[in-house]
Amino acid sequence: MFFILFVLHDISKINELLHAWEEAGVKGATVLLSTGLGRIRQNFGLMEDFPLFPSMSEIMERMDEMDLSRTLFSVVETDQIVNKLLENTQKVVGDLSQPNTGILIVLPVAHVYGLKSYSPD
């Protein structure tokens, strides 16, 4: 089994990417809003009007202004699914060696607890 983590830069491609992952054999995925250090620095960096101890509402206000990426994660069973997932991901977002496409991480999984087997029924 493998843990897949993908940070998608262009959020307009999320639906197409999820469909491509399903076609690769991914049975389920979790999608989170995310941002990286570069975007935080770009949007928050050296802002004199940003308080030293911001309230949650001030942070959320700033987050709404930011262009947030999406982080997807899933667990897949085989190397074949990983390979197809990589192929399908690059068909959607482009060559991952290029900037502003995304970051894909694949890790081996020793154990999984609480993951139900998927059944279309």
Image (cartoon, grey):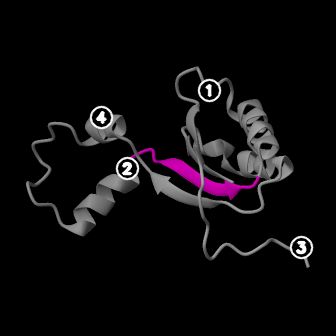
| Residue 66 x, y percent position in the rendering | 39, 46
In space, the residues marked 1 and 2 are separated at their CA atoms by 26 Å
Q: Residue furthest top?
A: 98
Q: Amino acid at mark 4?
A: Gln
Q: Earlier in the sequence, mark 1 or mark 4?
A: 4
Magenta residue span = 65-77
Question: Marks 2 and 3: which is nearer the front?
Answer: 3
What is the quadrant of the N terminus in the image? bottom right
Identify the mark at residue 120; answer none if there is no mark. 3
In space, the residues marked 4 and 2 are separated at their CA atoms by 12 Å
In space, the residues marked 1 and 4 are separated at their CA atoms by 23 Å
Identify the mark at residue 96; answer none if there is no mark. 1
Q: What residue sits 64% from the left and 57% below the top?
A: 74
Q: In the rendered structure, are the residues bearing label 1 and label 4 in contact, judged by CB atoms less than 8 Å apart?
A: no
Identify the mark at residue 42; answer none if there is no mark. 4
Q: What residue sits 59% from the left and 21% below the top?
A: 97
Instruction: Please name the predominant secondary structure of the magenta segment in the image.
Output: strand
* Residue placed most toward the observer, 84 or 58: 84
Q: What residue sits 39% from the left and 55% below the top?
A: 64
Question: Marks 1 and 2: which is nearer the front?
Answer: 1
Vertical side of 84 occupied by 18: above or below: below
Q: Earlier in the sequence, mark 3 or mark 4?
A: 4
| Residue 68 x, y percent position in the rendering | 46, 48
Q: Residue furthest right?
A: 121
